[in-house]
Structure formats: structure tokens, C-alpha cells
Image (spheres, rainbow, N blue to C red):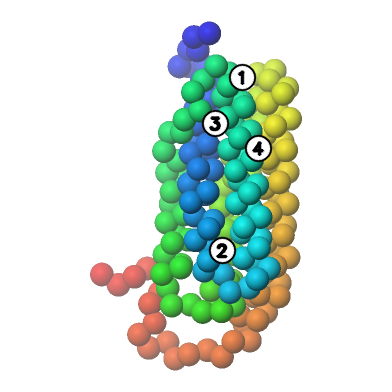
Amino acid sequence: MATSKNSLRALYIDELKDIYNAEKQLTKALPKMAKAASSEDLRNGFTEHLEQTKSHVERLEQIFEALGERASGKKCAGMEGLVEEGSEIMDEDFEGSIMDAALIAAAQRVEHYEIAAYGTVSAFAELLGESEHVSLLQQTLDEEKQTDAKLTELSKDINTAANNEPSEPASGSRRRGRAA
């Protein structure tokens, strides 16, 4: 059925395409984050989340199919920025638990972005009477919240270890803003 561009359904589909692209970007970023992690628990967490992310993509594809829409993404600039920030962190010369703490910070930004996105599309699906979609989206939303909680739990030991690492002199250290 043709959808007016000026309707909640059109906005819903647009948001689904955005989060679909975001999830696809994550399937490429998570293996790199896992490789950069020194904590085995954190590495395993990233690997588990990669598998979850693949099921998030499949759930979205089910929803697109039910809507009679092609599963495609419009470029998600928000996720692109978050992934780029994560990439920059991995390019820094942080080591050990300091790198792990930085990776957790980047991963939690991603999780919070996804929690917001899935909360929104779930609310839209509910208003549109798409109860099967709501169920699929809620399942993903719950998993994103669980991942965020796991990262918070991991951060307790990792951040403590990072705080106990001997600090090096600040001379010549590269900071986030990067000098021109």
C-alpha cells in the first residue's frame, strides 16, 4: 500500500531504515573492538554482542518483509559518528585496561543510541497497531539494555584497573581534539 510521505508510517519506515543501517555498521565495528580489547571478558562481550547484532538485523528484515518494504538502510550518520569515535579511540596509544575503559565508553555510547532508537520505533509500531513488530523490537530493546548493563558491570573492574595503572608524563600525548 502506498504510504504518504507525511505520515507516522512513513516516519516509522524511515527510522527502521536508519537503525537497520546502524546495525549493519556495528557488525563491521564490533570485531575490531573485540580485537582491540585486552580483557578476555570484554573481548567475549563484544563477540557475543556481534552475534546478537546479527539477530537484530534479521528481526528488522522480518519487519521490512511484513511491511512489504525492501530491507535497506539509509545512511545512519549518528552511528557513523559513534563508530568513527570508536575508531579514533583504537588509534590512540592507550594500552591494557586504559584501552578497555575507552572501548567500554565508546560501546556504551552506541548502546544508548540504540536504546533510544529502538524505544522510538517500538512506540511508533505500537501506535500503528503493529503488535508483531512491537514484540520483535521490544526483544531487541531488552537485549540492548542488557548489553549496556553488562558493560557497566565490566567497567567496574576495568576502570579500577585503569585507575591503578602507572601514569606517564603528559608530554607529547595525543588527546581527543587532535592538533591540526
Mark toward the start of the polypeptide (3 vs 4): 3
Secondary element type, mark 4: helix
x 48%, y 12%: residue:
4
Circle 3: residue type: Leu
Q: Residue furthest top?
A: 1
Residue beneath label 2, please?
34
Tag of residue 66: 1
Image quarter where the C terminus lies is bottom left
Tag of residue 139: none
Q: Where is residue 92 shown, x and y percent of the image?
A: 42, 73
Secondary element type, mark 3: helix
Mark toward the start of the polypeptide (1 vs 4): 1
Q: Where is residue 115 shown, x and y percent of the image?
A: 63, 44
Mark toward the start of the polypeptide (2 vs 1): 2
In the depicted view, which residue is nearer to us: 171 or 44?
44
Circle 4: residue type: Gly
Q: Nearer the viewer, mark 3 or mark 4?
A: 3
Q: CA distance from mark 2 to mark 1?
A: 34 Å
Residue beneath label 3, please?
16
Secondary element type, mark 1: helix
Tag of residue 119: 4
Q: Do tag 2 and tag 3 residues touch (Cβ < 8 Å)?
A: no
